């Protein structure tokens, strides 16, 4: 146990509910149980008890569960008091536990203790918060896979291979009298190639998991009256944006969250891009350009009917004016009125009026953001996981170059060590206290 104090918190949401759960963890659990419910129940056996205050008056009544260390969520003695879910009665129960020497838990402190007491690694602890915050069923399933250790197993498998390779390489450095010339052993190069391939595959899987967790933002951009707001309503399935025949109706930024194959997608409708003298419209265009620059993806909407004669030139001109055009799709709107003979790879014919081509647009967006429809085997991942994996593979790629150039073994050994340290950050083997504080501070209290 990394601390001697006892913590407590309400483990169910604030407000009224049928059941409220107060969780207690630490060395004072036995004292709290004896004072509040008369005796410490048998481990893992539910008991129906009265919850008593300092004068022996009944505060509430309900189930009591005791989990004896180390066979508990935190690895410490844990007590759960499951009573009626009214805020007043739950506050009285928590107050009584505090009177008996416990303190209020900080956000995520129960999970933090579980991590520090080796009940789970850091990626599993993060998966708890991700499971609670899941915005879709696919995200929930992927978070559960991470919680069950699927992500950690893949990372630890790579680390095991790194350790075996490091042992061999460093042995040739530390014991030259043994005449182990690793530079002449082709297996070293093969092992490096295998490790790079494994991390590369893990980066792809983690990227899918990060999409499920983080989602993407897509900005609809284009000239006034191109049909951006109509297309926005088509994609969201509701009247999110105001639609009129008047050009420049949208002046402010309009947001709506949808799910595309389980991935949360924030659609952002913006003002039409044009130069004007109206201060309100000028501000709307400024905000539109700001959103475009920050977006993960830009959906450029073009009015086909208005640009029959200069379609290619119009699209090129429009793309040239955008603050960010690396990731974009061109939606050729009003295809119910006119269609060109050919469209390019990043273009799709749609009609916001009839709904024609909207499914094709969704598919093109999914392809553009790198989404695989099947989530089988996907685990939840965070931006920091992807960063650690990228740093790890960069170290290995440098190691491959060093090995290929017959460079001194010390340099290769250092790259292998750097890779292991980067991957160790994912599971918490190498993690700073500042990072731990940031991670667990994002958890809800009571978890």
Image (cartoon, rainbow, N blue to C red):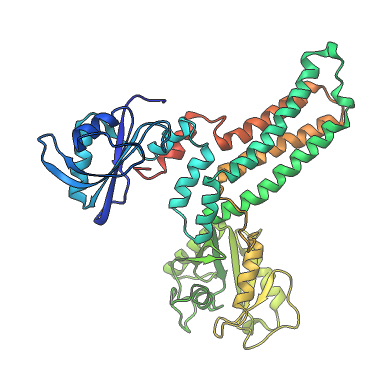
Q: Is residue 370 left or right of residue 11?
A: right
Residue extending furthest toward the top = 177
Percent position of residue 69, x then y: 39, 31
Residue in the picture at 42% in, 32% down: 75
In this orientation, which residue lies closer to the viewer: 271 or 410? Answer: 410
Residue in the picture at 72% in, 25% down: 414
Does 268 sit above or below residue 311? Answer: above
Percent position of residue 238, x then y: 45, 76
Tell me if I can see residue 214 in this picture: no
Does 423 sit above or below residue 354? Answer: above
Residue extending furthest toward the bottom = 337
Q: Quadrant of the C terminus?
A: top left
In this orientation, which residue lies closer to the viewer: 122 or 278? Answer: 122
Percent position of residue 154, x then y: 65, 42
Which picture quadrant has residue 91?
top left
Tell me if I can see residue 5 in this picture: yes
In this orientation, which residue lies closer to the viewer: 74 or 440? Answer: 74
Q: Is residue 278 left or right of residue 396?
A: left
């Amino acid at each position: 146990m990394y601390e001697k104090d006892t913590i407590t918190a309400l483990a169910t949401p604030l407000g009224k509910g049928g059941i409220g759960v107060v969780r207690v963890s630490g060395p004072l659990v036995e004292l709290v149980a004896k004072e509040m419910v008369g005796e410490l129940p048998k481990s893992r056996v539910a008991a129906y008890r009265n919850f008593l205050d300092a004068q022996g008056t009944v505060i509430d009544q309900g189930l009591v569960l005791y989990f004896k260390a180390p066979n508990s969520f935190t690895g410490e003695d844990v007590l759960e008091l499951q009573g009626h879910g009214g805020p007043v009665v739950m506050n009285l129960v928590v107050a009584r536990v505090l009177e008996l020497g416990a303190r209020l838990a900080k956000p995520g402190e129960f999970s933090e203790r579980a991590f520090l007491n080796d009940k789970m690694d850091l990626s599993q602890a993060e998966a708890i918060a991700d499971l609670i915050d899941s915005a879709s069923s696919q995200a929930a399933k992927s978070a559960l896979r991470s919680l069950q250790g699927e992500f950690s197993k893949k990372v630890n498998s790579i680390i095991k291979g790194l350790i075996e390779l490091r042992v061999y390489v460093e042995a040739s450095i530390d014991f030259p009298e043994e005449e182990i010339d690793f530079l002449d052993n082709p297996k070293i190069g093969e092992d490096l190639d295998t490790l790079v391939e494994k991390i590369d595959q893990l980066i792809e899987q983690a990227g899918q998991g990060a999409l499920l967790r983080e989602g993407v933002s897509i900005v609809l951009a284009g000239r006034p009256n191109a049909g951006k707001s109509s297309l926005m309503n088509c994609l969201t399935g509701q009247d999110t944006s105001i639609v009129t025949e008047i050009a420049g109706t949208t002046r402010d930024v309009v947001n709506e969250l949808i799910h595309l194959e389980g991935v949360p997608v924030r659609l952002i409708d913006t003002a039409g891009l044009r130069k004007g003298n109206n201060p309100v419209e000028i501000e709307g265009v400024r905000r539109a350009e700001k959103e475009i620059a920050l977006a993960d993806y830009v959906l450029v909407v073009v009015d086909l009917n208005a640009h029959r004669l200069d379609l290619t030139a119009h699209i090129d001109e429009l793309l040239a004016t955008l603050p960010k055009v690396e990731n974009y799709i061109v939606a050729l709107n009003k295809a119910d009125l006119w269609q060109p003979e050919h469209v390019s790879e990043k273009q799709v014919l749609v009609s916001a009026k009839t709904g024609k081509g909207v499914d094709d647009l969704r598919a093109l967006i999914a392809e553009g953001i790198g989404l695989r429809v099947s989530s089988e085997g996907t685990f939840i991942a965070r931006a920091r996981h992807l960063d650690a994996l990228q740093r790890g593979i960069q170290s290995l790629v440098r190691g491959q170059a060093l090995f290929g150039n017959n460079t001194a073994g010390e340099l290769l050994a250092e790259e292998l060590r750097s890779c292991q340290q980067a991957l160790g950050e994912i599971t918490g083997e190498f993690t700073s206290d500042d990072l731990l504080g940031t991670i667990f501070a994002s958890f809800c209290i009571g978890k």
